[in-house]
């Protein structure tokens, strides 16, 4: 990875690869299996949809507010440590609250989103600040690709332990892996840090600077694509294990399906560094939606284990394409003064707006028409996105082609 050099007493850029690995490993031991836990304590599909929508909605508020805080006051390392501790504490409370009160469970899910979601955004922003100094922002995916490896490791371990013990094992694994996250949080280099290893902060984005952000066409295009992609992808969180369980697969087999998607994400992260030099950003985003549609098609219509694994691989590759593409688009076009807010908007639109709508739709369709029908109906979104992107590309090329008459 280019730019893999020492950046201060706190560590090197390689530590970002390690923190991505363990953060996503911790995430994988908890979030994907919450749907199974909710089902085990008696929640119906609509209630599960509500929990996912609440989590996504809280993610919107948390990501924007905490990103602005880090831009304005610095304290990135202390913020990351606080977020990790908060997510661990609230995960423990989810295990206790779920048995007694749905309202209390919703409050704990809200708090979990506040702790868990902004962590990745702040980490992204810190890494990109270092990479932009050496004009290496296109190598971001080289560090981020260790995330899916950690996710795969966490989900395989968790899937196996659930099968031999109980779904509640997730509330032991998540805190254990989060302790490793805390260790590397203290090591990653913080941009603009002093001798104490903590960032100073800047005056923060002014209303005028934020206004410039919302005048960028690429910003609106990127956010729209992430919203639609997140809407379609939301079902592969807590509802995917329920679909696979409906089709007769065990929790350990479910874990291997998700590992296939993580493998796709890993290799597409690796390939995106090359693709960003050869293909336009809209072209990469179109490819991401095609991959997402392939995943839907396989899960809904195929009974072949091999084809299911291939389609899961394609689905994972979808995220490994669209996320680096949008990250690169923002890195080269957004003013540095509001970089954290811009990158925070990625999570807001995908994990926030997209997931809120997706969870509610999937919960409603699953409750009333069955989970298979819910997946069929939501597959229309990536299909429509592909059509619109192709039409848009055609119109752009037509406009650029000089007339000969």
Image (tube, helix red, strand yellow):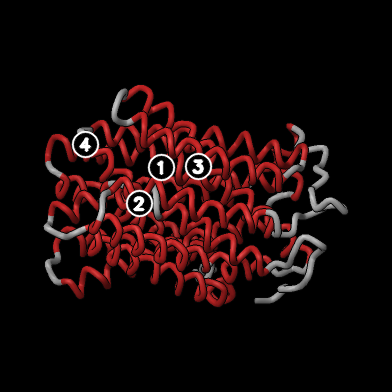
Q: Which mark is residue 45?
A: 4
How far, Cα to Cα, is label 3 from label 4? 26 Å
Nearer to us: label 1 or label 4: 4
Q: Residues within 10 Å of mark 2 (few under 14, many from 20)?
A: many
> Can I make out residue 13 in this image?
yes
Mark 2–mark 1 CB contact (< 8 Å): yes
User: Which comes sooner in the sequence, label 3 or label 1?
Assistant: 3
Q: Position of residue 162 (x, y in %)?
A: 27, 55
Q: Residues within 10 Å of mark 4 (few under 14, many from 20)?
A: many
Q: Secondary structure at mark 3?
A: helix
User: Which comes sooner in the sequence, label 1 or label 4?
Assistant: 4
Q: Which mark is residue 233?
A: 2
Q: Is residue 312 above or below residue 270?
A: above
Q: Which residue is mark 3?
A: 88
User: Which comes sooner in the sequence, label 4 or label 2?
Assistant: 4
Q: Quadrant of residue 51?
A: top left
- Residue occupying the far right of the picture: 195
Q: Position of residue 165 (x, y in %)?
A: 25, 54
How far, Cα to Cα, is label 3 from label 1? 25 Å
At 52% from the left and 68% from the top, the residue drawn is 145
Q: Secondary structure at mark 4?
A: helix
Q: Which residue is mark 1?
A: 354
């Amino acid at each position: 990875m280019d730019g893999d050099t020492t950046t201060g007493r706190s560590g090197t850029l390689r530590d970002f690869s390690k923190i991505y690995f363990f953060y996503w490993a911790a995430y994988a031991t908890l979030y994907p299996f919450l749907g199974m836990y909710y089902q085990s304590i008696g929640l119906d599909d609509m209630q599960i949809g509500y929990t996912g929508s609440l989590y996504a909605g809280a993610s919107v508020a948390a990501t924007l507010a905490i990103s602005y805080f880090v831009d304005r006051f610095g304290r990135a390392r202390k913020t990351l440590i606080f977020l990790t501790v908060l997510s661990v504490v609230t995960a423990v409370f989810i295990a206790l609250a779920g048995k007694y009160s749905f309202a209390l469970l919703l409050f704990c899910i809200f708090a979990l989103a506040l702790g868990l979601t902004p962590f990745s955004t702040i980490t992204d922003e810190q890494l990109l600040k270092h990479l932009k100094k050496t004009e290496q922002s296109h190598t971001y995916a080289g560090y981020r690709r260790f995330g899916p490896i950690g996710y795969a490791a966490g989900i395989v371990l968790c899937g196996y332990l659930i099968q031999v013990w109980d779904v509640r094992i997730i509330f032991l694994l998540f805190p254990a892996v989060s302790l490793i996250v805390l260790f590397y949080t203290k090591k990653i280099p913080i941009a603009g840090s002093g001798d104490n290893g903590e960032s100073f902060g800047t005056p923060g984005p002014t209303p005028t600077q934020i206004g410039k952000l919302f005048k960028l066409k690429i910003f609106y295009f990127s956010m729209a694509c992430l919203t639609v992609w997140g809407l379609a992808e939301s079902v592969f969180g807590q509802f995917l294990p329920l679909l696979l369980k409906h089709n007769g697969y065990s929790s350990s087999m479910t874990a291997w399906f998700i590992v296939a998607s993580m493998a796709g994400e890993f290799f597409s992260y690796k390939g995106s560094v090359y693709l960003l030099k050869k293909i336009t950003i809209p072209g990469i985003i179109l490819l991401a939606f095609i991959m997402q549609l392939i995943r839907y098609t396989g899960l809904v219509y195929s009974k072949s284990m091999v084809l299911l694994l291939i389609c899961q691989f394609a689905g994972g590759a979808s995220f490994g394409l669209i996320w680096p593409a949008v990250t690169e688009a923002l890195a080269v076009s957004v003013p540095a003064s509001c970089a954290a807010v811009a990158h925070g908007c990625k999570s807001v639109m995908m994990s926030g707006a997209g997931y809120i709508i997706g969870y509610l739709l999937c919960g409603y369709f699953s409750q009333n028409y069955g989970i298979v029908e819910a997946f069929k109906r939501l597959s229309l979104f990536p299909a429509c996105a592909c059509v619109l992107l192709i039409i848009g590309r055609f119109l752009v090329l037509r406009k650029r082609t000089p007339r000969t008459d």
